[in-house]
Image (spheres, rainbow, N blue to C red):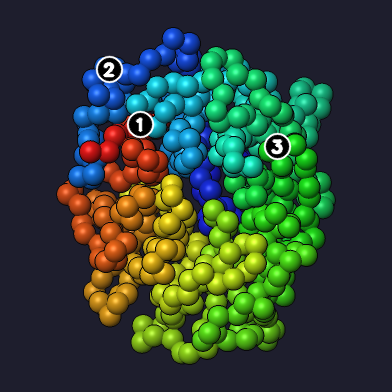
Protein backbone atom coordinates (compact mmCIF):
# COMPACT_ATOMS: atom_id res chain seq x y z
CA UNK A 1 0.00 0.00 0.00
CA UNK A 2 1.01 3.58 -0.56
CA UNK A 3 2.47 5.67 2.20
CA UNK A 4 2.23 9.44 2.64
CA UNK A 5 6.01 9.38 3.03
CA UNK A 6 7.74 10.87 -0.02
CA UNK A 7 11.41 10.77 -0.89
CA UNK A 8 12.20 13.14 -3.77
CA UNK A 9 15.25 12.29 -5.83
CA UNK A 10 16.98 14.88 -7.97
CA UNK A 11 16.73 12.65 -11.02
CA UNK A 12 12.97 13.18 -10.85
CA UNK A 13 12.53 16.41 -8.96
CA UNK A 14 14.25 19.77 -8.98
CA UNK A 15 12.11 21.40 -6.39
CA UNK A 16 11.14 20.69 -2.82
CA UNK A 17 7.72 20.21 -1.17
CA UNK A 18 6.12 20.27 2.26
CA UNK A 19 3.38 17.72 2.85
CA UNK A 20 0.64 18.25 5.40
CA UNK A 21 -1.44 15.19 6.19
CA UNK A 22 -5.02 15.54 7.39
CA UNK A 23 -5.84 12.81 9.85
CA UNK A 24 -2.16 12.09 10.62
CA UNK A 25 -2.56 13.31 14.17
CA UNK A 26 -3.16 16.83 15.41
CA UNK A 27 -5.15 19.57 13.73
CA UNK A 28 -5.11 23.31 13.91
CA UNK A 29 -7.17 26.01 12.28
CA UNK A 30 -4.99 28.42 10.32
CA UNK A 31 -4.14 31.81 11.70
CA UNK A 32 -6.16 34.69 10.30
CA UNK A 33 -4.51 37.31 8.15
CA UNK A 34 -7.11 39.97 8.91
CA UNK A 35 -5.71 42.58 11.28
CA UNK A 36 -2.32 40.91 11.31
CA UNK A 37 0.50 43.25 12.23
CA UNK A 38 4.24 43.04 12.21
CA UNK A 39 5.23 41.02 15.30
CA UNK A 40 6.69 42.92 18.20
CA UNK A 41 10.11 42.38 19.69
CA UNK A 42 12.19 42.92 16.55
CA UNK A 43 10.57 40.11 14.61
CA UNK A 44 9.38 37.84 17.40
CA UNK A 45 6.08 36.29 16.35
CA UNK A 46 4.63 36.16 19.84
CA UNK A 47 5.27 33.68 22.65
CA UNK A 48 8.61 32.03 23.16
CA UNK A 49 10.64 30.96 20.17
CA UNK A 50 11.95 27.43 19.72
CA UNK A 51 15.49 27.15 21.02
CA UNK A 52 17.39 26.70 17.77
CA UNK A 53 21.16 26.85 17.43
CA UNK A 54 21.68 28.73 14.17
CA UNK A 55 24.73 29.88 12.19
CA UNK A 56 26.36 33.17 13.21
CA UNK A 57 24.70 34.98 10.31
CA UNK A 58 21.28 34.62 11.96
CA UNK A 59 19.74 35.83 15.23
CA UNK A 60 18.23 32.93 17.19
CA UNK A 61 16.14 35.37 19.24
CA UNK A 62 14.35 37.17 16.40
CA UNK A 63 11.88 35.36 14.22
CA UNK A 64 8.86 33.11 14.24
CA UNK A 65 7.79 29.46 14.41
CA UNK A 66 4.95 27.47 12.86
CA UNK A 67 4.34 23.92 14.08
CA UNK A 68 2.71 21.44 11.72
CA UNK A 69 1.93 18.49 13.95
CA UNK A 70 0.29 16.39 11.26
CA UNK A 71 3.32 16.21 8.98
CA UNK A 72 4.74 12.72 8.82
CA UNK A 73 8.49 12.28 9.23
CA UNK A 74 10.18 11.71 5.90
CA UNK A 75 8.22 14.29 3.94
CA UNK A 76 10.01 17.13 2.21
CA UNK A 77 10.37 20.85 2.79
CA UNK A 78 8.52 24.18 2.59
CA UNK A 79 9.16 26.33 -0.47
CA UNK A 80 10.03 30.01 -0.48
CA UNK A 81 9.08 32.39 -3.29
CA UNK A 82 12.48 34.13 -3.49
CA UNK A 83 11.28 37.30 -5.19
CA UNK A 84 8.56 38.08 -2.69
CA UNK A 85 10.43 36.74 0.35
CA UNK A 86 7.49 34.69 1.54
CA UNK A 87 7.05 31.19 2.93
CA UNK A 88 4.11 28.96 2.05
CA UNK A 89 2.99 25.78 3.80
CA UNK A 90 -0.13 23.65 4.20
CA UNK A 91 -2.12 23.58 7.43
CA UNK A 92 -4.86 21.05 8.08
CA UNK A 93 -8.11 20.94 10.04
CA UNK A 94 -9.70 17.50 9.83
CA UNK A 95 -10.18 16.70 6.10
CA UNK A 96 -9.84 20.33 5.04
CA UNK A 97 -6.54 21.95 4.19
CA UNK A 98 -5.41 25.53 3.81
CA UNK A 99 -2.46 27.19 2.14
CA UNK A 100 -0.95 29.84 4.39
CA UNK A 101 1.71 32.41 3.47
CA UNK A 102 3.95 34.37 5.85
CA UNK A 103 6.58 37.01 5.40
CA UNK A 104 9.89 35.19 5.74
CA UNK A 105 11.53 37.84 7.93
CA UNK A 106 8.83 38.75 10.45
CA UNK A 107 6.43 35.84 10.24
CA UNK A 108 3.45 38.08 9.53
CA UNK A 109 0.59 36.04 8.04
CA UNK A 110 -0.11 37.64 4.66
CA UNK A 111 -2.93 35.41 3.52
CA UNK A 112 -4.73 32.13 4.07
CA UNK A 113 -6.59 30.27 1.36
CA UNK A 114 -10.15 29.09 1.46
CA UNK A 115 -10.60 25.56 2.74
CA UNK A 116 -9.54 22.93 0.22
CA UNK A 117 -10.40 19.24 0.33
CA UNK A 118 -7.83 17.25 -1.68
CA UNK A 119 -8.80 14.03 -3.44
CA UNK A 120 -9.04 10.81 -1.44
CA UNK A 121 -5.95 9.06 -0.19
CA UNK A 122 -4.33 6.35 -2.31
CA UNK A 123 -3.57 4.42 0.86
CA UNK A 124 -6.74 2.38 1.38
CA UNK A 125 -5.22 -0.24 3.68
CA UNK A 126 -7.90 0.58 6.27
CA UNK A 127 -10.72 0.31 3.72
CA UNK A 128 -12.76 3.12 2.24
CA UNK A 129 -12.74 6.21 4.40
CA UNK A 130 -14.28 9.33 2.81
CA UNK A 131 -12.49 11.56 5.35
CA UNK A 132 -9.02 10.24 4.52
CA UNK A 133 -7.51 12.73 2.06
CA UNK A 134 -4.24 12.63 0.17
CA UNK A 135 -1.24 14.47 1.66
CA UNK A 136 -1.10 17.98 0.23
CA UNK A 137 1.98 19.94 -0.80
CA UNK A 138 2.79 23.39 -2.17
CA UNK A 139 5.42 24.70 -4.60
CA UNK A 140 6.38 28.14 -5.92
CA UNK A 141 6.38 28.97 -9.65
CA UNK A 142 7.36 32.26 -11.35
CA UNK A 143 5.82 33.46 -14.61
CA UNK A 144 5.96 36.81 -16.36
CA UNK A 145 7.58 38.55 -13.40
CA UNK A 146 4.88 37.34 -11.00
CA UNK A 147 5.01 34.52 -8.47
CA UNK A 148 2.44 31.84 -7.83
CA UNK A 149 1.94 29.13 -5.25
CA UNK A 150 0.59 25.80 -6.47
CA UNK A 151 -0.97 23.53 -3.86
CA UNK A 152 -1.29 19.95 -5.03
CA UNK A 153 -2.22 16.46 -3.95
CA UNK A 154 -1.99 13.04 -5.60
CA UNK A 155 -5.02 10.89 -4.84
CA UNK A 156 -8.30 9.33 -5.96
CA UNK A 157 -11.22 11.46 -7.11
CA UNK A 158 -14.77 10.19 -7.10
CA UNK A 159 -14.12 7.16 -4.93
CA UNK A 160 -16.99 5.91 -2.80
CA UNK A 161 -18.56 2.62 -1.72
CA UNK A 162 -19.65 1.93 -5.31
CA UNK A 163 -16.81 3.43 -7.35
CA UNK A 164 -13.06 2.87 -7.46
CA UNK A 165 -12.35 6.48 -8.28
CA UNK A 166 -9.86 7.98 -10.71
CA UNK A 167 -6.22 8.63 -9.87
CA UNK A 168 -5.37 12.30 -10.34
CA UNK A 169 -3.06 15.08 -9.33
CA UNK A 170 -5.16 18.05 -8.28
CA UNK A 171 -3.48 21.45 -8.50
CA UNK A 172 -4.77 24.73 -7.01
CA UNK A 173 -3.02 27.85 -8.35
CA UNK A 174 -2.80 30.99 -6.16
CA UNK A 175 -1.19 34.37 -6.67
CA UNK A 176 1.72 34.65 -4.24
CA UNK A 177 0.91 38.33 -3.67
CA UNK A 178 -2.69 37.67 -2.55
CA UNK A 179 -3.95 39.03 0.77
CA UNK A 180 -6.62 38.35 3.37
CA UNK A 181 -8.52 35.22 4.39
CA UNK A 182 -10.38 32.55 2.42
CA UNK A 183 -8.37 33.39 -0.71
CA UNK A 184 -9.79 31.50 -3.67
CA UNK A 185 -7.48 29.81 -6.18
CA UNK A 186 -7.04 31.46 -9.55
CA UNK A 187 -7.73 28.07 -11.09
CA UNK A 188 -8.09 24.41 -10.16
CA UNK A 189 -6.73 21.71 -12.46
CA UNK A 190 -7.06 17.92 -12.38
CA UNK A 191 -4.36 15.91 -14.16
CA UNK A 192 -5.18 12.21 -14.76
CA UNK A 193 -2.41 9.86 -13.62
CA UNK A 194 -2.59 6.66 -15.64
CA UNK A 195 -0.48 3.71 -16.71
CA UNK A 196 -0.75 1.84 -19.98
CA UNK A 197 -2.60 -0.96 -18.21
CA UNK A 198 -4.73 1.44 -16.18
CA UNK A 199 -3.28 0.49 -12.82
CA UNK A 200 -2.39 2.89 -10.02
CA UNK A 201 1.19 4.14 -10.27
CA UNK A 202 3.86 5.08 -7.79
CA UNK A 203 4.20 8.55 -6.34
CA UNK A 204 3.42 11.40 -8.69
CA UNK A 205 5.33 14.59 -7.92
CA UNK A 206 4.73 18.24 -8.84
CA UNK A 207 7.62 20.72 -8.99
CA UNK A 208 8.59 24.05 -10.48
CA UNK A 209 9.53 23.12 -14.02
CA UNK A 210 10.61 26.61 -15.07
CA UNK A 211 9.14 28.88 -17.76
CA UNK A 212 6.00 29.43 -15.71
CA UNK A 213 5.05 25.75 -15.60
CA UNK A 214 4.26 23.40 -12.77
CA UNK A 215 5.61 20.05 -13.93
CA UNK A 216 3.76 16.87 -12.95
CA UNK A 217 5.80 13.67 -13.27
CA UNK A 218 5.32 9.97 -12.60
CA UNK A 219 6.72 6.68 -13.83
CA UNK A 220 5.05 3.83 -15.70
CA UNK A 221 7.60 1.08 -15.30
CA UNK A 222 10.74 2.46 -16.96
CA UNK A 223 8.79 5.10 -18.89
CA UNK A 224 8.48 8.59 -17.44
CA UNK A 225 5.38 10.72 -17.91
CA UNK A 226 5.34 14.51 -17.72
CA UNK A 227 2.50 17.02 -17.78
CA UNK A 228 3.11 20.78 -17.75
CA UNK A 229 0.58 23.18 -16.23
CA UNK A 230 0.83 26.80 -17.36
CA UNK A 231 0.12 28.68 -14.13
CA UNK A 232 -1.05 31.82 -15.95
CA UNK A 233 -3.55 30.19 -18.32
CA UNK A 234 -4.21 26.78 -16.78
CA UNK A 235 -3.30 25.11 -20.08
CA UNK A 236 -2.20 21.48 -19.63
CA UNK A 237 0.30 19.88 -22.04
CA UNK A 238 1.33 16.22 -21.97
CA UNK A 239 4.83 15.06 -22.99
CA UNK A 240 4.62 11.27 -22.93
CA UNK A 241 6.84 10.77 -25.99
CA UNK A 242 9.44 13.46 -25.39
CA UNK A 243 12.00 11.47 -23.45
CA UNK A 244 12.53 12.02 -19.74
CA UNK A 245 11.45 15.59 -19.07
CA UNK A 246 13.48 17.37 -16.37
CA UNK A 247 12.21 20.92 -16.86
CA UNK A 248 10.72 23.46 -19.20
CA UNK A 249 11.88 26.29 -21.46
CA UNK A 250 9.85 28.87 -23.33
CA UNK A 251 10.28 26.73 -26.47
CA UNK A 252 9.29 23.43 -24.95
CA UNK A 253 10.44 20.67 -22.59
CA UNK A 254 14.04 20.09 -21.53
CA UNK A 255 14.45 16.34 -21.77
CA UNK A 256 16.92 13.49 -21.79
CA UNK A 257 16.64 11.41 -24.93
CA UNK A 258 16.13 7.68 -24.59
CA UNK A 259 19.18 7.28 -26.85
CA UNK A 260 21.35 9.50 -24.67
CA UNK A 261 21.99 13.19 -24.78
CA UNK A 262 19.58 15.98 -23.88
CA UNK A 263 18.21 19.24 -25.17
CA UNK A 264 15.20 21.45 -25.78
CA UNK A 265 12.74 19.99 -28.23
CA UNK A 266 12.38 22.23 -31.31
CA UNK A 267 15.47 24.05 -30.04
CA UNK A 268 19.00 22.76 -29.45
CA UNK A 269 20.58 19.40 -28.61
CA UNK A 270 23.55 18.47 -26.43
CA UNK A 271 25.66 17.30 -29.39
CA UNK A 272 25.89 20.99 -30.32
CA UNK A 273 27.27 22.00 -26.90
CA UNK A 274 29.47 19.05 -25.93
CA UNK A 275 32.11 20.27 -23.46
CA UNK A 276 35.82 19.69 -23.80
CA UNK A 277 37.23 16.47 -22.35
CA UNK A 278 34.14 14.25 -22.70
CA UNK A 279 33.61 11.00 -24.51
CA UNK A 280 31.31 11.01 -27.54
CA UNK A 281 29.42 7.79 -26.84
CA UNK A 282 29.94 6.26 -23.38
CA UNK A 283 28.94 2.62 -23.12
CA UNK A 284 25.68 1.83 -21.38
CA UNK A 285 27.27 -1.34 -20.04
CA UNK A 286 25.11 -3.68 -22.10
CA UNK A 287 26.86 -3.39 -25.45
CA UNK A 288 24.73 -0.42 -26.51
CA UNK A 289 26.27 2.95 -27.32
CA UNK A 290 24.42 6.04 -26.12
CA UNK A 291 25.09 9.69 -26.73
CA UNK A 292 26.93 11.40 -23.89
CA UNK A 293 25.33 13.96 -21.60
CA UNK A 294 22.51 13.86 -19.06
CA UNK A 295 20.47 16.83 -17.88
CA UNK A 296 20.09 16.51 -14.12
CA UNK A 297 17.90 19.47 -13.25
CA UNK A 298 16.59 22.84 -14.40
CA UNK A 299 16.72 25.81 -12.03
CA UNK A 300 16.37 29.56 -12.57
CA UNK A 301 16.70 29.27 -16.34
CA UNK A 302 19.80 27.08 -16.09
CA UNK A 303 20.36 23.41 -16.86
CA UNK A 304 22.86 21.44 -14.82
CA UNK A 305 24.21 18.45 -16.75
CA UNK A 306 26.64 15.56 -16.24
CA UNK A 307 28.99 14.02 -18.81
CA UNK A 308 31.22 10.97 -18.85
CA UNK A 309 34.83 12.14 -19.26
CA UNK A 310 37.15 10.77 -21.89
CA UNK A 311 39.84 10.00 -19.27
CA UNK A 312 40.13 7.13 -16.80
CA UNK A 313 38.89 6.69 -13.27
CA UNK A 314 40.47 7.32 -9.88
CA UNK A 315 42.47 4.93 -7.74
CA UNK A 316 39.45 4.20 -5.54
CA UNK A 317 37.33 3.18 -8.52
CA UNK A 318 35.28 6.37 -8.70
CA UNK A 319 35.43 8.67 -11.64
CA UNK A 320 35.63 12.40 -12.15
CA UNK A 321 32.47 13.59 -13.86
CA UNK A 322 32.28 16.68 -16.03
CA UNK A 323 29.52 19.01 -14.84
CA UNK A 324 28.21 21.87 -16.92
CA UNK A 325 25.74 24.69 -16.41
CA UNK A 326 23.86 25.71 -19.56
CA UNK A 327 21.59 28.57 -20.51
CA UNK A 328 18.23 26.88 -21.06
CA UNK A 329 17.30 29.04 -24.05
CA UNK A 330 20.46 28.58 -26.12
CA UNK A 331 22.32 25.65 -24.59
CA UNK A 332 25.40 27.83 -24.15
CA UNK A 333 27.81 26.44 -21.56
CA UNK A 334 28.09 28.97 -18.73
CA UNK A 335 30.38 26.91 -16.49
CA UNK A 336 32.36 23.68 -16.75
CA UNK A 337 33.90 21.77 -13.86
CA UNK A 338 35.04 18.30 -12.86
CA UNK A 339 33.97 16.75 -9.60
CA UNK A 340 34.05 13.24 -8.17
CA UNK A 341 30.97 11.33 -9.29
CA UNK A 342 28.20 10.42 -6.86
CA UNK A 343 25.14 8.32 -7.73
CA UNK A 344 22.02 10.47 -7.67
CA UNK A 345 20.07 7.92 -5.66
CA UNK A 346 22.81 7.34 -3.09
CA UNK A 347 21.57 7.92 0.45
CA UNK A 348 23.60 10.78 1.88
CA UNK A 349 22.03 11.33 5.30
CA UNK A 350 21.32 8.64 7.90
CA UNK A 351 20.33 10.88 10.77
CA UNK A 352 16.69 11.59 9.79
CA UNK A 353 17.27 15.27 9.14
CA UNK A 354 14.36 17.15 7.63
CA UNK A 355 16.10 17.51 4.29
CA UNK A 356 16.48 13.75 4.17
CA UNK A 357 18.49 11.95 1.51
CA UNK A 358 17.69 13.99 -1.59
CA UNK A 359 20.26 15.49 -3.91
CA UNK A 360 19.30 19.11 -3.47
CA UNK A 361 19.34 22.07 -5.83
CA UNK A 362 19.22 25.63 -4.53
CA UNK A 363 19.65 29.09 -6.03
CA UNK A 364 20.50 32.28 -4.16
CA UNK A 365 17.72 34.91 -4.35
CA UNK A 366 19.84 37.12 -6.63
CA UNK A 367 20.52 34.20 -8.97
CA UNK A 368 24.31 34.47 -8.75
CA UNK A 369 24.94 31.23 -6.85
CA UNK A 370 23.68 27.78 -7.74
CA UNK A 371 24.24 24.64 -5.72
CA UNK A 372 23.62 21.07 -6.74
CA UNK A 373 24.23 18.34 -4.20
CA UNK A 374 27.93 18.62 -3.41
CA UNK A 375 28.76 21.43 -5.89
CA UNK A 376 28.60 25.22 -5.46
CA UNK A 377 28.68 27.42 -8.59
CA UNK A 378 29.41 31.15 -8.71
CA UNK A 379 27.89 32.07 -12.07
CA UNK A 380 29.24 35.62 -12.01
CA UNK A 381 32.82 34.78 -11.08
CA UNK A 382 32.85 31.53 -13.03
CA UNK A 383 34.16 29.46 -10.12
CA UNK A 384 33.05 26.10 -8.74
CA UNK A 385 33.58 24.47 -5.35
CA UNK A 386 33.49 20.66 -5.31
CA UNK A 387 32.63 19.17 -1.92
CA UNK A 388 32.74 15.51 -2.90
CA UNK A 389 34.88 13.12 -0.91
CA UNK A 390 38.56 13.72 -1.44
CA UNK A 391 38.02 16.78 -3.61
CA UNK A 392 40.99 19.06 -4.13
CA UNK A 393 43.47 16.30 -3.37
CA UNK A 394 42.30 15.99 0.25
CA UNK A 395 41.65 12.26 0.30
CA UNK A 396 40.60 12.33 3.94
CA UNK A 397 37.81 14.84 3.48
CA UNK A 398 34.22 13.59 3.62
CA UNK A 399 31.29 14.16 1.27
CA UNK A 400 29.27 17.28 2.03
CA UNK A 401 25.80 18.05 0.75
CA UNK A 402 24.65 21.67 0.33
CA UNK A 403 21.20 22.69 1.55
CA UNK A 404 21.02 26.39 0.67
CA UNK A 405 23.04 29.44 -0.39
CA UNK A 406 22.68 33.14 0.45
CA UNK A 407 23.09 36.21 -1.75
CA UNK A 408 26.54 36.79 -0.27
CA UNK A 409 27.69 33.34 -1.41
CA UNK A 410 27.55 31.69 2.01
CA UNK A 411 26.32 28.13 1.59
CA UNK A 412 25.11 25.79 4.34
CA UNK A 413 25.10 22.03 4.32
CA UNK A 414 25.80 18.77 6.09
CA UNK A 415 28.56 16.18 6.20
CA UNK A 416 26.98 13.23 4.42
CA UNK A 417 26.02 10.40 6.72
CA UNK A 418 27.22 12.17 9.86
CA UNK A 419 25.62 10.99 13.10
CA UNK A 420 25.35 13.10 15.12
CA UNK A 421 24.76 15.53 12.30
CA UNK A 422 27.66 17.83 11.39
CA UNK A 423 26.58 21.15 9.88
CA UNK A 424 28.98 23.06 7.64
CA UNK A 425 29.32 26.57 6.26
CA UNK A 426 30.99 27.11 2.88
CA UNK A 427 31.89 30.55 1.50
CA UNK A 428 31.77 30.47 -2.30
CA UNK A 429 34.76 32.84 -2.39
CA UNK A 430 37.08 30.13 -1.07
CA UNK A 431 35.11 26.89 -1.32
CA UNK A 432 36.62 25.83 2.01
CA UNK A 433 34.07 24.27 4.39
CA UNK A 434 33.98 24.98 8.12
CA UNK A 435 32.30 22.73 10.67
CA UNK A 436 29.68 24.54 12.78
CA UNK A 437 29.13 23.90 16.51
CA UNK A 438 27.39 20.66 17.46
CA UNK A 439 23.62 20.96 17.19
CA UNK A 440 23.63 23.84 14.69
CA UNK A 441 20.67 23.82 12.32
CA UNK A 442 21.22 24.92 8.74
CA UNK A 443 18.61 26.93 6.81
CA UNK A 444 16.66 25.06 4.18
CA UNK A 445 16.00 28.38 2.43
CA UNK A 446 17.72 31.74 2.50
CA UNK A 447 15.36 34.50 1.35
CA UNK A 448 16.72 38.03 1.69
CA UNK A 449 16.87 39.01 5.37
CA UNK A 450 16.06 35.63 6.90
CA UNK A 451 16.79 31.93 7.10
CA UNK A 452 14.01 29.34 7.05
CA UNK A 453 14.76 26.32 9.23
CA UNK A 454 12.94 22.99 9.31
CA UNK A 455 13.17 20.73 12.34
CA UNK A 456 11.33 17.64 13.51
CA UNK A 457 9.21 18.04 16.64
CA UNK A 458 9.68 15.45 19.36
CA UNK A 459 6.55 13.34 19.35
CA UNK A 460 5.70 14.05 15.72
CA UNK A 461 5.35 16.85 13.23
CA UNK A 462 7.60 19.50 11.77
CA UNK A 463 8.47 23.04 12.83
CA UNK A 464 8.96 25.75 10.20
CA UNK A 465 11.03 28.57 11.71
CA UNK A 466 12.15 31.92 10.38
CA UNK A 467 15.20 33.58 11.94
CA UNK A 468 16.28 37.05 10.87
CA UNK A 469 19.73 37.85 9.57
CA UNK A 470 22.04 39.78 11.89
Q: Residue at x 27, y 66 (%)?
A: 430
54 with respect to 270 (left or right)? left
Q: Indicate which disc, 3 or 2, sits on the residue closer to the N terminus.
A: 2
* Quarter-of-image position of residue 69: top left
| Local SS, label 1 | loop
State whether residue 402 is above or below residue 227: below
Task: Give the labeled residue for mark 3.
Answer: 232
State the mark number for residue 40. Answer: 2
Question: Circle 3 sits in a helix, a strand or a loop, which is it?
Answer: loop
Q: Mark 3 to mark 1: distance in Å? A: 28 Å
Using the image, determine if residue 422 lies above or below residue 259: above
Coordinates of residue 56 in the picture (x, y in percent): 20, 45
Residue 278 vertical placement versus 30 (above, below): below
Disc marking residue 105:
1
Q: Quadrant of residue 414?
A: bottom left
Image quadrant occupied by the N terminus: top right
Secondary structure category for the residue under label 2: helix
Give residue 4's position: percent from left, percent from top.
55, 37
Q: Residue at x 59, y 71 (%)?
A: 332
**Left or right, residue 61 beside residue 320:** left
- Examine the image and state in which quarter residue 283 appears: bottom right
Task: Tell me the crowding category of disc 1: few under 14, some 14 to 19, or many 20 or more residues within 10 angstroms, Cα based.
Answer: many
Residues at marks 1 and 2, CA–CA distance in whole angstroms? 12 Å
Residue 289 seen in render: yes
Amino acid sequence: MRSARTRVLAAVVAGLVLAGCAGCGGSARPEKAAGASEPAGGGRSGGSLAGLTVPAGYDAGRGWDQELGWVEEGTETAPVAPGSGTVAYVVADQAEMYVQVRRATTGKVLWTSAAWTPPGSLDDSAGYDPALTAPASVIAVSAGGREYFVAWAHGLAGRDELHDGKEIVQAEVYAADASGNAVAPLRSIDVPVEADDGTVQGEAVVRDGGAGRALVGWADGHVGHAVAIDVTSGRVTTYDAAGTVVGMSTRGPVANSYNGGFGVFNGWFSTDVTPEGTAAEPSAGFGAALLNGTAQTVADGKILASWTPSGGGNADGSEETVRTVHDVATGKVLLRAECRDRALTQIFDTDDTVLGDSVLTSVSPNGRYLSYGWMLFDLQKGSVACLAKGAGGNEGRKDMLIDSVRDDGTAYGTVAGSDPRVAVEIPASTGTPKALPTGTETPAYTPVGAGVFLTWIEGGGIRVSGRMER
